[in-house]
Image: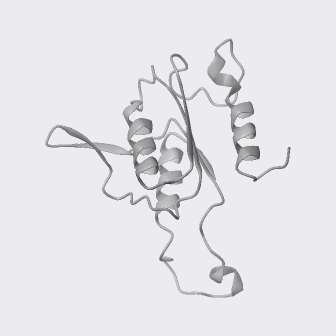
Amino acid sequence: MLGFSAGGHLVAAVSTHLEKRLYADIDEADRVSCRPDFAVALYPGHIWTYDDDKLQLNPELHFTKQTPPTFLLQAENDDVDSINHSLVYYIALKNARVFVEMHLYAEGKHAFGLRPTKLPITRWPQLMQTWLQTIGIILQ
């Protein structure tokens, strides 16, 4: 599963709500696990909140050991979704003992997507490919 910005939040939500389906089983496909094999969140949003002036994880997200391996990537100069989203996400994954890899870049802002630019952050697809090989999703 891969998502950018609000889609990065969706990645976190799907990765942490694995126990209960929202509908009754209809056929065999509904009995297959809904856990993604991996999660990739790029400049995710809605991951952190302030509570008593403390940076905290969004209370709707509950990371456990069953949360899939996760790849995080964000630019530090993102002016839409603060880097705090990725930092809190990373810490929550580490605390749950989930395999996680995070890459932070000084420049790239928000919505750098797939288009190549002169900035190093736009070479993230190769980093993700290497990570997918590391966790055994794709063969080397």
Instruction: Name the residue: 59% across, 52% down.
Output: 69
Instruction: Name the residue: 37% across, 34% down.
Output: 84
Q: Is residue 27 left or right of residue 57?
A: right
Viewport quadrant of the C terminus = top right
What number of labels is visible?
A: 0
The structure's colour scheme is one colour
Q: In which quarter of the image is residue 36?
A: bottom right
Q: Residue 43: percent from the left, percent from the top?
A: 50, 35
Q: Nearer the viewer, residue 35 or 5?
A: 35
- Name the residue at the right extreme: 140
In the displayed structure, 25 sits above or below 114; it is below
In the displayed structure, 68 sits above or below 104; it is below
Q: Is residue 24 left or right of residue 92?
A: right
- Name the residue at the left extreme: 52
In the displayed structure, 30 sits above or below 91; it is below
Q: Nearer the viewer, residue 91 or 49?
A: 91
Q: Residue 15: percent from the left, percent from the top?
A: 52, 59
Q: Which of 113 and 56 is in front in this view?
A: 56
Instruction: Name the residue: 60% across, 70% down.
Output: 34
Q: Residue 70: percent from the left, percent from the top?
A: 57, 48
- Name the residue at the top extreme: 118
Instruction: Name the residue: 48% across, 53% down.
Output: 12
In the displayed structure, 107 sits above or below 47; it is above
